[in-house]
Image (cartoon, rainbow, N blue to C red):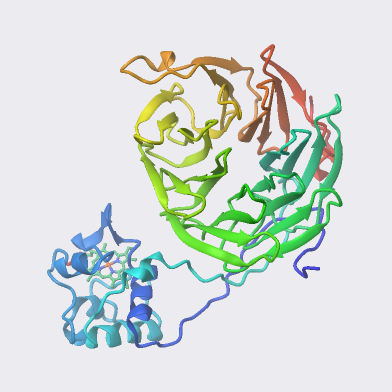
Amino acid sequence: MDGLMHRTAAFSLILLLCACQGRALADTKAALRVIRDQCVGCHKPGKAKGGLLLTTAEKMMQGGDSGTPVKPGKAAESLLYQLCLAEGDPHMPPKKQLAAAELAALKAWIDAGAAWDAAVFDEPPAPRQVKLSTLPAAHQPVLAMALSPDEKLLAVARANTVLLVDLAQPARPVIGSLEGQMEPVPSLAWSRDGRWLVSGGFQKLSIWDAGTRQPARVISQGLVGNVSALVCDASGKAIFAADGESGGAGFIRQFDMTSGTLLATWKAHDDNVLSLRLSAKGDRLLSAGADKMARVWDAASLKLVAALEGHTNHITAAAFNQDATQVATAGADREVKVWDVASREQDAVLGDKKVAFAGIDWTPDGKTLAVITDKGACSLHTDLKKHEGTQRSEASKERKLPAAGEALTCVVITGDSKWVFAGSFEGNVHVWDAADGKLAGRLELSPAPAEKAAPAAK
Ligand code: HEC
């Protein structure tokens, strides 16, 4: 049993960050970590304060408005060090004094010749100690859903619980739940044989036996933030999990499903990864994130196959078509894009540019693309055409479904294109009958504590 797992009706997450103060290390990595963590935020491309970039050795030596800030071998004569001293003017970092150990690391590094080590900038941050505690019970968002491979069960992550909804029964009742996690569940994935359900958490993920609904294993090795996206590989042997500190680089980790061993870890995005998918054949991994990028990876070699660049804001979700020749991305920039993986070109741009898209799902046969917005709208796109200078409205046949009236977070469409499910921040799952285009209602989830006192109006 994992000692961290406690059942609480109300929950949530307050991060009490324990300071992990570095020791006074007089080496290159230690100094560059100070620059990475304390300086780069204001001295990076797009935000070069004082004209100075501190992201590569070359840029640093090019200097800013006042010239080269580092004289290798002479810290006392280097502006970069002088400005960090208590009397520095302008003082760096502007509203803060570096710890003595950090200053010492910078000094020793410059005195030793200011060598560079680019690898420091791709390092995953170390996990921080956190304490989880409870927040208002009214906060019960549905943050993730996953359809079982046989499409009989819909797993719904609501707050800190995963509800299992039986789609084979007409009433779609909740027939079980996975309980015990304290913090919200931001991500969910089924193994392809339907035996295991994997749920994300904070600095951990849990593998549940879908039959007994008990946790089989909790994995936390190396995880630094929320596990924001998850997918199981095709062999059933490994899990891909995305994590990262909030606003920090997005990492993908590969874990062995049975032993929990960390098999691989790589920096996949410059900001948090918000979506992970595996192609139907299992040979391609798709990641997309807050750095506006979508990337396709070889699921075996983990090498980058394609980088899809064109969104101007977060990509909230992404999906493959049936043979992974195309990728669809939903953006906070109010656009849905369909990409050709081989050419990396945009085949189509969908959406009317009015609202941010929050989720996307593509039927396994590639026929129907379901998209949702954070204003409660849901639409289905079929007959996707290649964009050839034509109007947006001609890029696909779009069917707008009646609005849910709540901010939506995630969407699932069944393989036969008949049913669409969308989760909301309020904790509901809305159901549309795609055949007649009607809102069929909501799933009867067990009431959230807040609803018991004041039943939600239908
Ligand atoms: C919150 C933003 C911020 C952070 C963090 C920050 N700086 Fe700066 N930095 C600035 C600004 C703004 C200027 C320009 C100040 C001015 O010209 O008055 C500047 C200027 C500088 C300059 C002078 C550049 C030139 O050529 O004029 C150096 C050197 C420098 N920073 C080093 C650092 C170092 C080293 C750190 C980390 C220990 C750091 N900065 C962290 C905002 C920041």
User: 280 or 152, which lies in front?
Assistant: 280
User: 221 or 378, which lies in front?
Assistant: 221
214 relative to 21 in the view: left or right = right
Q: Residue 399 in the image: x percent, y percent? A: 57, 15
Q: Quadrant of residue 180?
A: bottom right
Q: Residue 346 in the image: x percent, y percent? A: 37, 29
Residue drawn 39% across and 87% down? 25
Q: Residue 24 in the image: x percent, y percent? A: 41, 88
Whether residue 54 is visible to the viewer of this picture, yes or no, is: yes
Whether residue 249 is visible to the viewer of this picture, yes or no, is: no
Residue drawn 62% across and 63% down? 203
Above or below, 358 against 161 in this view is: above
41 relative to 373 in the view: left or right = left
Above or below, 327 against 198 in this view is: above
Residue drawn 67% across and 27% down? 415
Residue drawn 26% across and 66% down? 54
251 relative to 63 in the view: left or right = right
Q: Quadrant of residue 30?
A: bottom left
Please state the quadrant of the image where ligand 1 appears.
Answer: bottom left
Quadrant of the drawing holding the N terminus? bottom right
User: 291 or 82, which lies in front?
Assistant: 291
Quadrant of the drawing holding the C terminus? top right
Above or below, 79 against 205 in this view is: below
Q: Residue 64 in the image: x percent, y percent? A: 16, 64
